[in-house]
Each structure stands twice: as structure tokens, then as C-alpha cells.
């Protein structure tokens, strides 16, 4: 069904902190119904793609927030879906972890459609080729981040966002 075509990384992705990264990914592979013959390869490949080399045997609770986020992302791409939804993929990450996550997203976007939900406009500029501004369930703008930024006299995306959305009261 549709679930097999979609990978989802929720903002506060739940993990089992007492499991190893590999154990957690194997658990997800079993839950997704991956055939026993392909599970080990799928887990290893997802771990490599998510940048977990050397960390697969580590207990999740002992990983940094950035690596826990990578474990959750590996779980989302385990079955190699053609579409990914990433909710605040760099939330709480330090600048180096954000850079690594953005590079990973760019790599994933070469093989899948990636939708990022974020309120951090720097993320849209750094990771997206197309940005939609949605307020109260309505699409207010749909364009490249650079084209949206150009709508503001300052050329800044956050200023354009403010112009597009109007006052904060309009969004309440």
C-alpha cells in the first residue's frame, strides 16, 4: 500500500533507547515485513546512507542527539521509499550536525521526492528547490526559496515570509 511508498521522519521520532542502532533497524525491517534474506542488507545500507558507520552496534541511549536523529532517518529510508516526509529534520542539531543532515537530505533527494516541513527558514533555503508557504491550511506561495526571498526589498526569505503571511495576528 501507500505506506510502502513513503518514509516518514517525525519531529520527535520515537526510538527504543535500550536497543542498538542495528537492533532497532532490524526491528523496523521485521515490522515492515522485509524478507529475512534482504533484512540484513537493508539495515546495513540504511545505516551507511544515514552516516551511522561505526555506530550501528552502539546503544541508542548513548548516542548524541544528532546520531539518534540519523538512526530515526535510517528507519525512514530502510525500505527505500520513493517519497520521504521529514518533519524538522535538523531540529536541535548543532551546526556541524545540521550541515551533515543537509548533505544527507541532498543525497536522498537524488533518489526520492523529499518533503520537508520546517518553520526554520534557513532550512528551506539550504535544502529545498521549492518552497510552499502554508497558513491556516491555505497555500499562500509556491516558488523557489530564492524567488520567494526576492519578493522582499531586503531579499531575505524571512522578510518575504512576513510579507506573504501578513501580520502574526493573521496567522493566529
Image (cartoon, helix red, strand yellow):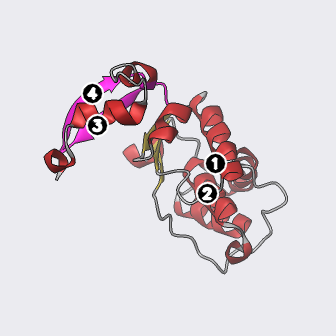
Q: CA distance from mark 3 to mark 2?
A: 25 Å
Q: Is residue 95 left or right of residue 156?
A: right
Q: Crowdedness of circle 3 by 10 Å Cα count: few (<14), some, many (20+)?
A: few
* Residue ID for mark 1: 98
Q: Are marks 2 and 1 in contact (CB under 8 Å)?
A: yes
The earlier-in-sequence mark between 3 and 2 is 2
Q: Toward the viewer: 35 or 9?
A: 9
The earlier-in-sequence mark between 3 and 4 is 4
Q: Crowdedness of circle 4 by 10 Å Cα count: few (<14), some, many (20+)?
A: some
Q: Secondary structure at mark 3?
A: helix
Q: Are marks 3 and 2 in contact (CB under 8 Å)?
A: no
The numbered mark at residue 7 is none
Q: Secondary structure at mark 2?
A: loop
The numbered mark at residue 162 is 3
Q: Was residue 136 drawn as part of the magenta stretch in this picture?
A: yes
The earlier-in-sequence mark between 1 and 4 is 1
Q: CA distance from mark 2 to mark 1?
A: 6 Å
Q: CA distance from mark 2 to mark 4?
A: 28 Å
Question: Residue at point 59% right, 53% down?
Answer: 73
Question: Residue 149: which quarter of the image?
Answer: top left
Q: Which residues are magenta?
A: 128-145
Question: Residue 21: which quarter of the image?
Answer: bottom right
**What secondary structure characterizes most of the magenta part?**
strand
Q: Are marks 1 and 4 in contact (CB under 8 Å)?
A: no
* Residue ID for mark 2: 93
Most extreme residue toward the right is 54
Question: Residue 102: which quarter of the image?
Answer: top right
User: Nearer the observer, disc 3 or disc 4?
Assistant: 3
* Residue ID for mark 4: 141
Amino acid at each position: 500500500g501507500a505506506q510502502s511508498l513513503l518514509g516518514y521522519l517525525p519531529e520527535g521520532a520515537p526510538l527504543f533507547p535500550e536497543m542498538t542502532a542495528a537492533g532497532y533497524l532490524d526491528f523496523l525491517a521485521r515490522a515492515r515485513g522485509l524478507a529475512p534474506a534482504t533484512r540484513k542488507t537493508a539495515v546495513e545500507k540504511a545505516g551507511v546512507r544515514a552516516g551511522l558507520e561505526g555506530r550501528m552496534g552502539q546503544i541508542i541511549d548513548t548516542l548524541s542527539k544528532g546520531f539518534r536523529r540519523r538512526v530515526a532517518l535510517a528507519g525512514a529510508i530502510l525500505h527505500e521509499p520513493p517519497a520521504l516526509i521529514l518533519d524538522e529534520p535538523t531540529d536541535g542539531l548543532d551546526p556541524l550536525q545540521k550541515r551533515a543532515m543537509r548533505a544527507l537530505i541532498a543525497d536522498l533527494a537524488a533518489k526520492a521526492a523529499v518533503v520537508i516541513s520546517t518553520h526554520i527558514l534557513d532550512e528551506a533555503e539550504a535544502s529545498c528547490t521549492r518552497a510552499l508557504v502554508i497558513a491556516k491550511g491555505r497555500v499562500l506561495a509556491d516558488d523557489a526559496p530564492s524567488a520567494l526571498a526576492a519578493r522582499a526589498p531586503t531579499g531575505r526569505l524571512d522578510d518575504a515570509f512576513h510579507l506573504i503571511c501578513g501580520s502574526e495576528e493573521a496567522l493566529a
